[in-house]
Image (spheres, helix red, strand yellow):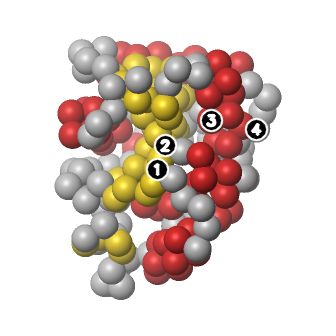
Amino acid sequence: MKIGIYGGSFNPVHFGHVGLAKWVIENTDLDELWMLVSPNNPLKPAGILAPEEERLEGVREAIKDIPHVKASDFEFHLPRPSYTANTLRELQKNYPEHEFTLVIGEDNIAIFDQWREYEYILENFRIFVYPRTSSRQTGGVASAEKGTDIRWNKNIAVFQAKPVKEIRYLSEAPTFDISSTAIRRSQGR
C-alpha cells in the first residue's frame, strides 16, 4: 500500500488540516493518509504545545468521517526529539510492505535543508508538497512572484543535483487561510 505521512503538531487541528487531508486522499495515488501527531517539533519553540494525547484525540475526532485517513501516535513511541528521518526509518522497518510518501507544505520544503538527514529522505521517499496561502506556485516549481519564498527555488536546484526519489508539487490542492498559531493567538495562548 502507498501511505502518505502528514505529520505535524496539530496544535490545534483545524479545518485546513482536515480539508487538505481529504483532498490528498481523494486526488493522489495514496491508499491511506496517516496524520502523524508529533509529540514535539525540533524546529519549534518548546512550551507551546497542548498535551500530545489531547492533540491526538482532536485529530481523531476531526477526521472520523474521512475514509482512508487515520490519526497516528507512532512518534509518541520513538526517542525525542522526533526527527522525520528517524520516523520514516522506523515506519519502513515496522511496515516493510508499505511505500511511504512524505506530505509537507511548501514552507517546509523551503527550509528542508535544515532537516536532519534531509538527503536520506529525498533519496528514499517520495515527497508531496502542498501550497500555502503565503506564496504562489505555478507549474510545479516556485515562481519569483511577490510573496514567494525564494528558498524554494534554491532548494529545488540543490535537490535536483542529488539523488531524489520524487518531489511532486500538488499545485491543484486547495489553500486554507487559517493556522494553528492564529487560533492559539485568538484564544490568548
* Tag 4 secondary structure: loop
Q: Are marks 1 and 2 in contact (CB under 8 Å)?
A: yes
| Residue assigned mark 2 | 102
Q: What's the distance in space between the residues labelled 3 and 1, CA to CA?
A: 12 Å
Marks 3 and 1, the one that precedes in the sequence: 3
Mark toward the start of the polypeptide (3 vs 4)? 4
Instruction: Kindly identify which numbered label has been placed on residue 112.
Output: none
Instruction: Write the residue at 59% across / 22% down.
Output: 96
Marks 4/1 in contact by CB < 8 Å: the verdict is no
x%, y% of residue 130? 35, 53
Dot 4 amino acid type: Pro
Residue found at x 54% / y 29%: 37
Q: CA distance from mark 4 to mark 1?
A: 22 Å
For mark 3, does the 10 Å Cα neighbourhood hold few (<14), some (14 to 19), or many (20 or more) residues? many
In the rendered image, which residue does mark 4 sit on? Answer: 81
- Which disc, if any, is residue 127? 1
Q: Amino acid at mark 3?
A: Leu
Q: Residues within 10 Å of mark 4 (few under 14, many from 20)?
A: some
Q: Nearer the viewer, residue 13 or 48?
A: 13
Q: Tell me if residue 151 comes above or below residue 47 in the rendering.
A: below
Q: Nearer the viewer, mark 3 or mark 4?
A: 3
Q: Which residue is mark 3?
A: 88
Q: Quadrant of residue 21?
A: top left
Tag in front: 2 or 4: 2
Left or right: 140 in relation to 123:
left
Q: Which one is earlier in the sequence, the residue at label 3 or at label 2?
A: 3
